[in-house]
Each structure stands twice: as structure tokens, then as C-alpha cells.
Amino acid sequence: MDSAIFRFHDELNFFLPRRQQNLSIEHEFSWRASIKDMIESLGVPHTEIGLLVVNGESICFDYIVKGGDRVEVYPRFDAPNGTGPQIRLRPPYPGRPRFILDQHLGRLAAYLRMLGFDTLYRNNYHDEELAQVSHDETRILLTRDVGLLKRSLVIYGYYVRSIHRQRQLEEIAARYDLLRLTEPFKHCMKCNGLLEKVTKDAIRPRVPDGTAEHYDEFHRCQSCERVYWKGAHYQRMQELLDQVMRGR
Ligand SMILES: [Zn+2]
């Protein structure tokens, strides 16, 4: 039987049993395993990890753990000082964040769309599908299922800690720096379709009486034809944004 010492830093402790949090964990093993598999057997999904340091050297997920290794696991790539060249575990996320959400996060999906982020959500995606689409379309997988984030196919993913809808949005906004990227009236809250600007006459039969007289700008979803304007919906979004900003 060999053993290695694991130390998880900062918010990664969230995934450990209470008795192991913020401590050096001696982990015994008698099989050959990659550091990814061993860390995930301790409870932390690979998508949450930004940097791995073994015996003072930055290494990748396929490193095979040896007896006597001292493993430091950091949530962010730029964590510690003085460890020499640091190896990125995954390329930086390219471009504007795009998401795919599991079935428990319908309200969060609507919020993200409302703020202008391309967000896939269905209440009947299978786990395989979520992982595959996240991989194929380079989408960030947001989920309340830790097991899903342990799949190797998932490159970009995040475990949503809170069960409170607005807290969830605050978490995601902080993690992916979304507030500087918001674009209202870009995606349909209902179906994620792209919105287009339309004239008053085009929407008059589709909106409540008086709406066309009170507002000047209207947008319509190119997929489901739902109409949006700067009324109650827009005010709700502004209030939500204000609250999210205050929560930071
Ligand atoms: Zn739509």
C-alpha cells in the first residue's frame, strides 16, 4: 500500500467531507491511477481545478500518482508563487461565455438569456447529452450534479453551489465576470433564439393594448416569435442586475 498527501485549497474544500476540510489528507492507494481520478475519488471534480502542483512542480491531469507524493490542488491557475513554470490544465475559455444547464437550473437559464448569454436548457437532457454538447460546442456546463463534472469529456464546467436562484446568478456572474458583458435583448428568455428589432406595426397584434403607444423599441424572437420591449420585463432585469451587483 502506498500513500500520498493531498491538500485542497480555498473553495475546493467545499467538495470535501467536513472532517477533511482545510487539512492535509493522507490518501492510501494500491492501484495505478491518474491524479485526475484520485482527486475525483476524494470528491473534487476536475472542472473546478485550475492548477496542480506535485512535490513543488506543476503537472497535468494524466500524471500518475506515486507513493510519497505531496499534492497541492488549487482552484485557480494563478494561485501560488514560486513553483516554477505552471502548466495550464485547459486552454482559457475562448470568447464570450456560452452555457448549457442541467434540468435543475431552468430559472438560471432564463436569467442568463435575459442578460444576453447564449444558454442551452431543456428539462429532459440526458447526462451523456449534456457532457457531449458541452464538449462539442465548447459550452460551460453548469450543474448541481458533481458526478457529471467528473466526466473527462467536460472541459469547462462549474458546480452551482447555491439552490437560491438569485444567489446562483450572483455566483455565475462573479465566476465568469458576466456583468461587463451583458447584452439585453439579444437572446429569447423562453427558447434562447436570437432577437431582432421590429417595427411597431409588426408587433401591434401580438402585444397587449396600449403597449405599442407606450414604447418605441420592440424585439422579436426569430425562433418562437415572442415579443420583447422595455416594459415590465426590462425593469425586472434592471432590478435583478442591481441586486446582483450589490451582492458582490
Ligand atoms: Zn424564442
Image: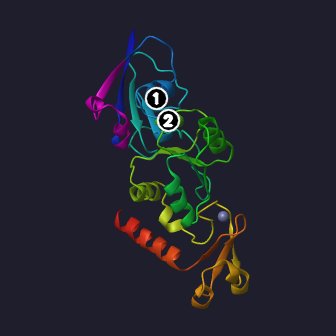
Query: Which residue appears at 35% of the width and 68% of the height?
Result: 246
Quadrant hosting ligand 1: bottom right
| Quarter of the image where one finds residue 68 | top left
Q: Residues within 10 Å of mark 1 (few under 14, many from 20)?
A: some
**If you read the primary sequence from the N terminus, does the residue marked by circle 2 or circle 1 appear first?**
1
Q: Residues within 10 Å of mark 2 (few under 14, many from 20)?
A: many
Q: Is residue 44 above or below residue 226?
A: above
The reply to whether the residue tagged 2 has its Cβ within 8 angstroms of ligand 1 is: no
Query: Which residue appears at 60% of the width and 85% of the height?
Result: 209
Question: Which amino acid, by three-letter code, is at mark 1?
Answer: Glu
Q: Tell me whether circle 2 and circle 1 mark residues in contact (CB < 8 Å).
A: yes
Q: How many labels sit on residues?
A: 2
Q: Secondary structure at mark 2?
A: helix
Q: Position of residue 105 (x, y in %)?
A: 50, 50
| Left or right of residue 185, residue 32 in this image | left
As drawn, which residue projects farthest toward the bottom? 213
- Can residue 50 be spotted in the picture? no
Q: Secondary structure at mark 1?
A: helix
As drawn, which residue projects farthest toward the top? 1
Give the numbered dot on residue 13.
Answer: none
Q: Between 170 and 126, which is closer to the camera in this rendering?
A: 126
Question: Which amino acid, by three-letter code, is at mark 2?
Answer: His
Q: Position of residue 94 (x, y in %)?
A: 62, 53
Give the numbered dot on residue 46.
Answer: 2
- Residue 13 on the magenta span: yes
Q: Which residue is mark 1?
A: 40
Query: Which residue appears at 50% of the width and 25% of the height?
Result: 37
| Left or right of residue 75, residue 197 in this image | right
Q: Which residues are magenta?
A: 11-27
Q: Is residue 49 above or below residue 176?
A: above
